[in-house]
Each structure stands twice: as structure tokens, then as C-alpha cells.
Amino acid sequence: MSEDRPPDITPKPHQGPGPNADDFDPKQHVWDGQVWWTADHQYWWDGSSWQSVDNPYSAPDFVAPLPKRHRPPGWWRDFWLGFVGIIAGNVILVILISVLAGATNGQPGSLVGLMPWLLNFGALALFAIIRPPVALGMLLAYGIALGLVLLAGIFLAIICFGGRGGVP
Amino acid sequence: MPAAVKPVLFEVFGVKVYSHPFFLALGIVVLLVWVAYEARRRNWPLHEIVPIGLAGFVGAMVGARLSILFFNGPSTAPIVLDFYKLFDPRIGPGSILGAIAGAYIAGYVASRAIGKAGCACDAFAPAMALGMAVGRIGDFLSGEDGLGKPTSLPWGVHPIAGSDYLVHPAPLYDAGFNLVWFVVLLALRDNPHFQSGRLLKFGVAGYAVVRFFIEFVRNNEVIALGLTGQQFFCLGLLALVAGYFVQAQRRRPATQVV
């Protein structure tokens, strides 16, 4: 007795390369000004995978705000740890460098001079890999500090790096 | 003859507001506002655009400063290599070319670190051009680097009050181009061939071409072959972008759907 199973009419998901893939070919796809479509207009790209036309895309002009993203527990603690930690770490580093400079008559040495670069960006890279919220907190601290520097500069006669190889 | 430059823009209760940092800050604000608008238009979530934008800003500041070592030579090392001088508001941030490279690298790394699908960088292309157009007004008003080389062209300007010669208003050439480039990039932003990072690469390449030629009327230091460090940097940027587009063309399958 043969099995009378109804034919599977569920549309197969499209597995082709997305617009962010190296082998994506724009000429085989259609851009409607908002999203990419496959040439047969059966699938559209949602930013991470192809969606069937049955799952309709409503082109947003200015859409409602995206739903709030839920952070995993401890995310904000890590974030603020990164923010405060990098400020405190640099204050300690400045004190350490000035103590070292004092001990060597104001010549702290090139390795000590490079230490802040290595420690700051080394820590940023390390935390970006092992604990991204910490790295994001550090990034915010740098961003605020550099933003304040730019704003403070408005009221100061700043020296620029001269075009003929010197400072200013 | 009165000078075209105006280093102090205005005074508020006796406090001077300087034109160079004022327009620099205004340019960055304009850039960020445009990126926010573009991100909203493209429906990019805040948790993606904020870390990428932050990383881009920090990368731009670091890149601007470090690139000075290449453009202006080792005499700048004591300031450039001092990490904490990055936070000294009395020192100018550095070069816009270094800022572009730094922002691009940092934004790319952040984008990969947060696992963003696709590329957010196209939102930065028109914004960057508009921000630079605004920022260059400050360079002109502060008479940065003596504005440009002497010229007898009718639009030449006096670099300092009482000077008996005219110079190229080089920062205004830059600002004018960036304004036009902003409109071009705006027109291309929804073109299917300028998606997934291609618009930003095209934008950077366009600026590099024009900046290469503007350098001939600026006062930057020639380092070799009659070219400035900035011109070598532009050539390097163009080579990288050209390499990317050639590679992308090769990867494209030969068959095409009509």
C-alpha cells in the first residue's frame, strides 16, 4: 500500500549569499530602495537571512522605534566597570609615570612613554574579545573625554601642527 | 588690505570663541546628526550604530594625531607619541586624512566585534563629506598653514592683514568639493551598486583624488618626488580602494540574470 502523503508545499528557504557576502552579485538581485530582493522577487533580505515573500516586508519610511533590546544579566555592571575602570587605571598610570619621570630626572624613557598606548588599546582589544560590554564602557569613556577636549578647544588658542614639519 | 582670516569668531562676555575648533566641533556634530538620520532611515538599531559610531570617533581622533608623525616628521614625536597629549585641548587634533583612516579601521573592528550582519559604513559617506565641508570653514577662518601658496588668480585672498600678496584659499576648495560630493553621495545612497560598504569606499576615493590635487596649492611639506606626505597617503588610499573594487569584480559570477 502506497503512502498518500500530501505534497510538501512549504516554500524552501533561500540559501543564496546575502548582500554582505563576498560572492553576492547585485546584478542577480533587485534593490527596491529599501531592501534587496532575489531576481524572481520571491525572497527579500532582512539583514541576516532571506525571507519568503509570504513573510511580507513593509517598506518603512520612518518606522516605529525598534523594540528595546534586552541585555543579559551583568551587562550594565560590566559596562560601568569598563567606564570607571579605564578612568581610574589612567589616573594611576599618570601618577606612576610622573613618579618614574621624577626618579630619572624627567626622562621616563621611551618604553614608559609608550606604556599608556599599549595598556589602553591592549586592554580595549582584549575586552572587545573576552567581554564586549567592558570594551564598550571604555570606548564611551574615551569618547566623552575626547568630546570634552574638542569643546574645551573652542575657548583656547590651539596650536596646530605646522605644514613645514614642526610643531606648531 | 584686510585679511580674509578671522581666528577669533566672536566673544561671549569677554571669552573668545576660536573659529578653528568651533567649526571642527560643529562639523563633528553635523556628521553625527546626519549619521543618526541615515541610521534611522535605514532602520539600523541603536545597539549597532552607537558602538560603531563611538569607535569611529575615537579612531578618528587617534588616527588624526598619529598620522602627523608621517606627514610632519619625527620632530613631532614628543607630542604625537605622548598618549595623554591626546587629551590636551590646546593642541590641534591633527590631520583629517589620518582621521578618515582611523575612523574606518576602528568602525570596521567595532562592526565585526559586535557581530553586525552587513556593513553600516555607507551611512557615514554623505555625513563625512558634509562634516568636512563645515570643518574646513574653520581652517579657512583661522588661516591654517598660511591657507595656500601665492597666486595671482582673482579669487586669491590675503593671508594676513596688510599683506601685499594673495594666496589660494585652499580650505575653501576642500569645503566646496565636499559640499558637491555630499550631494553626489546623497544621490547614490540608494543605488544598488553602492551598498554594503561601496558608497563609503567610493566617497573616500573621490576625496582622495581631489585632495591629491589640492595639495599642490597647499603649504605642506614635500617629502619625496615633489609630493607631500598627504599625497602619498591619498595614493595609498586610492590603491586600496581600487584593489577592493577589482577584487569584487573578479569574485562576481560570469552568469547574469536579465
Image: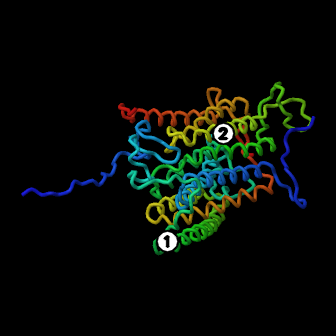
Chain designation of label 1:
A
Q: Which residue position holds label 2?
A: B183
How many marks can you see? 2
Camera-nearest label, 1 or 2: 2
| A146 w.r.t. B73: above or below | below
In depth, the one of B86 and B193 nearer the eye is B193
| Label 2: which secondary element | helix
Q: Provide residue B215's location: percent of width, then percent of height.
A: 68, 32
Q: Which residue in the protein does label 1 denote?
A: A75
Question: Viewed as shown, does residue A118 lie left or right of B87?
Answer: left
Specify whether residue A15 is in view.
yes
Q: Nearer the viewer, residue A150 or B117?
A: B117
Residue at 81% of width from left, 43% of height from top? B141
Could you say which quadrant of the image residue B155 lies in? top right
Nearest the camera: A43 or B80?
A43
> Residue B56 location, x and y as percent?
58, 53
Q: Amino acid at mark 2?
A: Val
* Residue A34, image x, y percentages: 52, 48
Q: Quadrant of the N terminus of chain B?
A: top right
Q: Residue at x 84, y 36 (%)?
A: B159
Q: Nearer the viewer, residue B2 or B183?
A: B183
The reply to whether residue A110 is in sight is: no
Secondary structure at numbered mark 1? helix
